[in-house]
Image: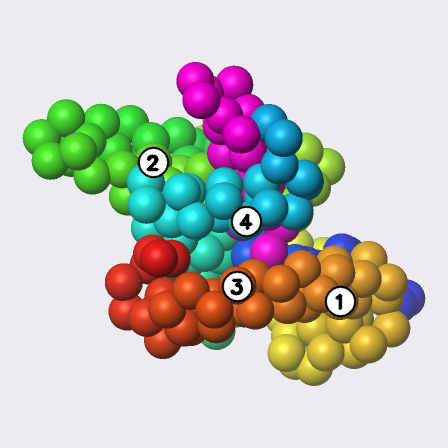
């Protein structure tokens, strides 16, 4: 029987959509702020939202957060313990993961004003949404439910991912869309201090 690996959004889909949603939310928030320049067009408004978001949120942490469940679960489930788990969606793909991050974030926020853990919680929540985790409630509601083990043979996971990426629209369309969305971001970064400056500081001038 041919087993399907399921929709697998990889790096570009996760990062760009998570960033995009945050920028749009910031733009909507700014629209209602006192002194908002509502005469601006959509693109300048998004651009200014992107810049001001980068001053309250370290966007590098946001990008890492958007991938965090995979960064932890994929090595654990596929590389280190393939016989135990054999899936790249484990404990960090459960709702409890962003929840714990958010709760743990209260203390540093109150002490130092750091919102880093909240940002990771947001990124991870978006990750679960984009992975359609509501379709896999046994994982989503762990530890209330038992983590169910996979039907997927763990061998040659990387090969499977590449094959899926090339043949399955639900895998390659988000990556292409993500790549396209990143183009204006890179152009903007290039004009505002450069990509390296952004990677070093997490802010856009
Ligand atoms: Zn994932």
Query: Eyeballing the image, is 99 above or below 155?
Result: above
Mark 3 highlights which residue? 188
Please tell me which residue is depicted at 42% across the width and 64% down the height of the picture.
Answer: 192
Q: Which residues are magenta?
A: 16-37
* Percent x, y of residue 42: 68, 40
Ligand 1 neighbours mark 1 (CB distance < 8 Å) = no
Left or right side of 13 for 57: left
Please tell me which residue is depicted at 86% across the width and 63% down the height of the picture.
Answer: 169
The 10 Å Cα crowd at callout 4, few under 14, some 14 to 19, many 20 or more, is some
* Percent x, y of residue 185: 56, 62
Q: CA distance from mark 1 to mark 3?
A: 19 Å
Residue 47, numbered circle = 4
The quadrant of the image that shows the C terminus is bottom left
* Percent x, y of residue 167: 87, 73
The 10 Å Cα crowd at callout 3, few under 14, some 14 to 19, many 20 or more, is some
Residue 176, numbered circle = 1
Q: Earlier in the sequence, mark 2 or mark 4?
A: 4
Residue 18 located within the stretch drawn in magenta = yes
């Amino acid at each position: 029987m041919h087993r399907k690996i399921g929709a697998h959004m990889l790096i570009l889909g996760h990062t760009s959509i998570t960033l995009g949603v945050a920028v749009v939310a910031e733009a909507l928030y700014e629209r209602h702020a006192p002194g908002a320049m509502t005469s601006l067009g959509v693109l300048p408004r998004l651009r200014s939202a992107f810049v001001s978001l980068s001053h309250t949120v370290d966007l590098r942490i946001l990008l890492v957060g958007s991938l965090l469940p995979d960064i932890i679960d994929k090595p654990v489930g596929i590389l280190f313990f393939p016989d135990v788990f054999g899936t790249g969606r484990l404990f960090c793909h459960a709702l409890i993961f962003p929840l714990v991050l958010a709760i743990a974030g209260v203390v540093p926020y109150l002490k130092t004003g750091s919102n880093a853990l909240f940002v990771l919680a947001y990124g991870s929540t978006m990750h679960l949404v984009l992975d359609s985790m509501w379709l896999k409630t046994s994982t989503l509601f762990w530890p209330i439910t038992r983590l169910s083990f996979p039907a997927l043979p763990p061998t040659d996971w990387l090969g499977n991912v590449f094959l899926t990426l090339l043949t399955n629209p639900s895998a390659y369309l988000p990556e292409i869309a993500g790549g396209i969305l990143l183009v204006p971001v890179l152009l903007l970064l290039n004009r505002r201090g450069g990509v390296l400056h952004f990677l070093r500081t997490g802010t856009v001038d």
